[in-house]
Image (cartoon, rainbow, N blue to C red):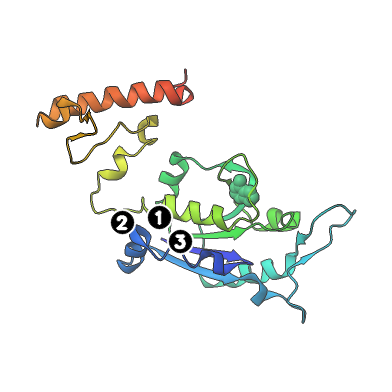
Amino acid sequence: MRFDIITVLPELLDGPFSHSILKRAQQKGHLEVHLHNLRDYATNKQKQVDDYPFGGGAGMVMKVEPIAACIEKLLSERSYDEVVYTSPDGLRLDQGICNRMSLLNNVIILCGHYKGVDERIRQKYITMELSIGDYVLSGGELAAAVIVDSIGRLIPGVLNDETSALTDSFQDNLLAPPIYTRPAAWEGMSVPEILLSGHEAKIDEWRYEQSLERTRARRPDLLGE
Ligand code: ADE
C-alpha cells in the first residue's frame, strides 16, 4: 500500500514511520510513504501556500493552486483509491475504517493547516475527510501519522503474528482483556491462576469474559448498551 502525504511540515513526519512495525513494513515492501512538501508546488517567489480568507475573519486559508498542482501530478502518475483530507469535521476514524482501508492500494492524504483548505479543493479532489477525534490539532500531520500507523499495521503481511491484530481492542467491538508477563507474582499481586493453567479453551473463555466486562464498564456504547 502506498501513501502520498501532502504537507507544509514534512519534517514533522520524518519520525513516525522510521521505527518498529512501520519501518519493517516498508523494508518488507508492504508499505510506501512518500512525503510531498506543499511549498515545492507554490507558484510565487515567496513560496506562498496560504492567503487571507475572502469575507474577512481570523486565520489563513490554504491556497488552491499549490495543492491542485501536487494532486494533479500524483494523479497523472497512478490512480488513487482515496484522496483523504485530515480535518476535525471529517468522519471519525475507527477500527472498521482502518480495516477497510488496509486493503486499498494508493491513498493521498492532504494535511489540513491554518484555518483549513479552500472549499474548492474539497469539492474537486477530496473523496474522504477523516478526523482522529473531537478535538482540534494545530495541523493535520499528527492525524496523518495516526491514520498511516493504524492502517499500515493492518496491511496483510505486516504483523509477524497474523492473529495479533485480531485480538486488538475494537476488533469485534470489544476492548482487549488484561494481559500479564513474568514475574507471576509482583508486590503481592498475582497473575490470574487460569493464565498459568495451560488450558487453552478455558483461557480463551476467561479472556472473552474479561473483554466483555471491561467493555461494559468502560465503553458500553460499543455493545450498543
Ligand atoms: N486537524 C485538526 N484537528 C484534527 C482532527 N481532530 N482530526 C484530523 N485532522 C485534524
Q: What residue is drawn where x is 45% and y is 61%?
A: 16
Expressed as whole percent of the image width and height from the top left, the position of residue 27 reads 32, 68
Q: Is residue 129 left or right of residue 175?
A: right
* Looking at the image, residue 225 lies above or below residue 170: above
Q: Quadrant of residue 11?
A: bottom right
Q: Which mark is residue 16?
A: 3
Residue farthest to the left? Answer: 198
Label 1 element class: helix
Q: What amino acid is found at the position of numbered circle 2 in the picture?
A: Val
Label 3 element class: loop
Q: Quadrant of residue 118?
A: bottom right
* Looking at the image, residue 172 lies above or below residue 69: above
Per the model, the C-alpha gap separating discs 3 and 2 is 16 Å
Expressed as whole percent of the image width and height from the top left, the position of residue 168 reads 34, 39
In this view of the protein, can residue 111 be seen by the observer?
yes
CB-based contact (under 8 Å), mark 2 and mark 1: yes
Expressed as whole percent of the image width and height from the top left, the position of residue 113 reads 68, 58
Expressed as whole percent of the image width and height from the top left, the position of residue 19 reads 37, 63
Name the residue beneath numbered marker 2: 158
Q: What residue is drawn where x is 36% and y is 66%?
A: 26
- Counting residues from the start of the chain, the first of labels 1 and 3 encountered is 3
Q: What residue is drawn where x is 15% and y is 26%?
A: 193
Q: What amino acid is found at the position of numbered circle 3 in the picture?
A: Pro
Name the residue beneath numbered marker 1: 152
Per the model, the C-alpha gap separating discs 1 and 3 is 12 Å
Residue farthest to the front? Answer: 187
